[in-house]
Amino acid sequence: MLQVKDVHAGYSGRKVLHGVSLHVDVGEVVALVGPNGAGKTTLLRVISGVLRPQRGQVRWQGQDMLRHPPRARARLVAVVPQSREGPLAFTVEQTVLLGRTPYMGWLGVPGPRDRRAVEQALALADLTHLRHRRLSELSGGEQQRVLLARALAQETPILLLDEPTTHLDLFYQAHFLSRVRRLARETHRAVLIVLHDLNLAALYADRVYLLARGRVFAQGPPAQVFTPARLEAVYGLKVQVLPLDGTVMVVPKTEATG
């Protein structure tokens, strides 16, 4: 499993994370939720190796990932970033091929295994028909799926997603997260995903970690974590939590709802 133990981290002397611990099992989708500034993206940066923690450990299968060189770490962790970054002049296929960088030699010439990984990633992200289109010609939602395919092409056991549904409409939000959950189970990946939408987290995550002010406020299945008292304490907003097909739906209280 992926284990994060007692992580403290921040930027330029400003501490953001205060002793955060969590775990993600293989085949599991775990959501990080919480208000802006809670430390969700910072935690992903620590796990991916972009940000060095002040204290704490990040382990995969018992090994300290923070001690791995960047190339070795890139074979363990793939990231779907919050921003739709990418060379807009590149085609979809060329962009997805960038996910094979940790495996290719210094000349960057792809081999048969790299080509197979790209083909599989394009198919999984429903992008095969767009493979020759340039990123600049795609919608925001299509660009987001390209970033998912690039991460899938890395063939890593750990997949980190930072608010991946931001640029997707309702159909593609459901399609995207259903696909991610299926991939976790079928390809035995540990998936950690940052979501602002609590209802999406309730529908598609096996467990959630509710972060507040850089600490884990609660963790467990969504139906157990998402209680009116907890959410009001963290978000400063009165909500209703309604049962829905084995999980819950969170609705802000208004004058009409009481």
Image (spheres, helix red, strand yellow):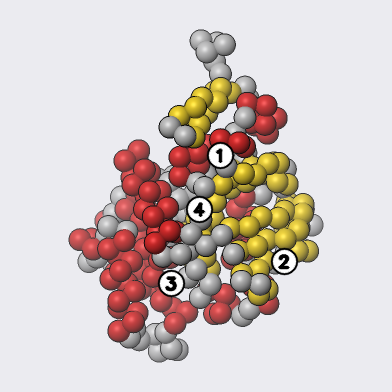
Looking at the rendered structure, the kind of residue marked 4 is: Val
Q: Dot 3, how many residues are within 10 Å of its Cα: few (below 14), some (14-19), or many (20+)?
A: many
Compared to residue 44, the image places residue 165 above or below, namely above
Q: How far apart are marks 1 and 3 (CA)?
A: 30 Å
Question: Residue 222 has which mark?
Answer: 1
Name the residue at 65% across, 62% down.
Answer: 3
Viewport quadrant of the C terminus: top right
Single out the mark in the foreground, 1 or 3: 1
Q: Position of residue 104 (x, y in %)?
A: 42, 84
Single out the mark in the foreground, 1 or 2: 1
* Furthest residue toward left: 129
Q: In the image, 37: left or right of 179?
A: right
Compared to residue 115, the image places residue 145 above or below, namely above
* Image quarter of residue 186: bottom left
Earlier-in-chain disc, 2 versus 4:
4
Q: Can residue 96 be seen in this view?
A: yes
* Image quarter of residue 36: top right
Q: In the image, 249: left or right of 52?
A: left
Q: Say if mark 4 contacts mark 1, CB within 8 Å.
A: no
Closest to the observer, 142 or 57: 57
What residue is shown with label 3? 154
Earlier-in-chain disc, 2 versus 3:
2
What residue is shown with label 2? 57
Looking at the rendered structure, the kind of residue marked 3 is: Gln
